[in-house]
Image (cartoon, grey):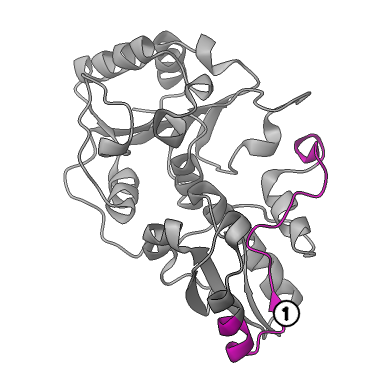
Amino acid sequence: MKAIGFLGGQFGDLVIMTVCCRAFKRAYPDGHLTFAVAAKYRDILPLFFNHPLIDDFHVWEGYDTAWPTAADKEYTQWRGYDMVCNATAQHTRPDWYNHHHYAEEACLRFGLSPPVDLSYELAPWTKPFKDCRRVVTLSLFPSGGQQMHKTMPVAECEKLCMALKSKGYTPIQLGGRLEVKLENAIAPDLSILEAATLMRSSRLHITADTAFSSVAAAYKHPTLGFYGLGYPNMTTCISHLPPNVNATYIKDRDPKTVTAEDLLSLIETKGLLS
């Protein structure tokens, strides 16, 4: 079986697609899998290097309603794939989030049987940065600040940063110039690979519902996150929690009501910086 997949974007979804890779390889142990992403999201590809379940990579020309383009079709025909996954595959049902975890839903969208192990997976192939044990990385602004309903008020983010600094830690935003700038945090202009490496090197990652929460889970990095009910008639946010044995999550709460004190209390009680 020779296949190419899965979704063409978004950044967080592409990390979740590693569960689809696991499902494919379990169904076809000798299968050849090309991991394909849309050109808009090609900057994330270095995170997937040395992945044990990926045999090759490809960048689609098209995305959204423009997929596949004539060039995309020509490429798949030339390579002779047995299975070409729709890079814009629809969900199995409108309220899928009340029935399946995101990773299960991802597999079902491509006709794959979800594996028991729904953890995301990335190979930590870069060397950690030195002297980062007193760094706390932040990804508090989903979609670079375009979805502020998914995070706590900016004033609370600033209070969090000030408290971390008072404890001798350096808060660093991973989104850099692409997200809301916090006055009390550092926001370097990093590539996705550099940001992921910095996060892996840090003591703790604090996140809202962002792509970096999925990246952190794929590395099993210590994480503190918060998730609300972001879809119509959603009963619980469990479907969106990245599986991470080293994560502590505030669940099913309106993110706009989360405070710096809430996070600092969990850091203290859970010993996340001890």
Q: In what quadrant of the picture does the C terminus appear? A: top left
Q: Residue 76 occupies which quadrant of the picture?
A: bottom right
Image coordinates for residue 138, horizontal then vertical, percent: 35, 32
Q: Does the magenta stretch include residue 50?
A: no
Instruction: Give the left or right position of residue 187, taking residue 244 as reference.
Output: left
Would you place residue 83 above or below residue 243 in this image?
A: below
Instruction: Give the left or right position of residue 65, taking residue 98 as reference.
Output: left
Residue name at image x 19 percent, y 22 percent: 168
Name the element at disc 1: loop
Residue name at image x 16 percent, y 43 percent: 131
Would you place residue 240 above or below residue 29 in this image?
A: above
Q: How would you rate the neighbour count of disc 1 (Cα within 10 Å): few for under 14, some for 14-19, many for 20 or more?
A: few
Is residue 53 among what the camera can see? no
Q: In what quadrant of the picture does the N terminus appear? A: bottom right
Image coordinates for residue 94, horizontal then vertical, percent: 80, 39
Residue name at image x 51 percent, y 35 percent: 247
Instruction: Give the left or right position of residue 266, taking residue 197 as reference.
Output: right
* Residue bearing mark 1: 28
Is residue 9 among what the camera can see? yes
Number of marks in the rendered image: 1
Q: Residue 141 occupies which quadrant of the picture?
A: top left
Residue type at tag 1: Tyr
Q: Does the magenta stretch include residue 81?
A: yes
Would you place residue 32 above or below residue 104 in this image?
A: below
What is the magenta range?
Answer: 74-99
Residue name at image x 62 percent, y 64 percent: 6
Would you place residue 237 above or below residue 49 in this image?
A: above
Image coordinates for residue 128, horizontal then vertical, percent: 26, 54
Judging depth in this view, the residue of 114 and 245 nearest the camera is 114
Instruction: Give the left or right position of residue 52, taking residue 188 as reference.
Output: right
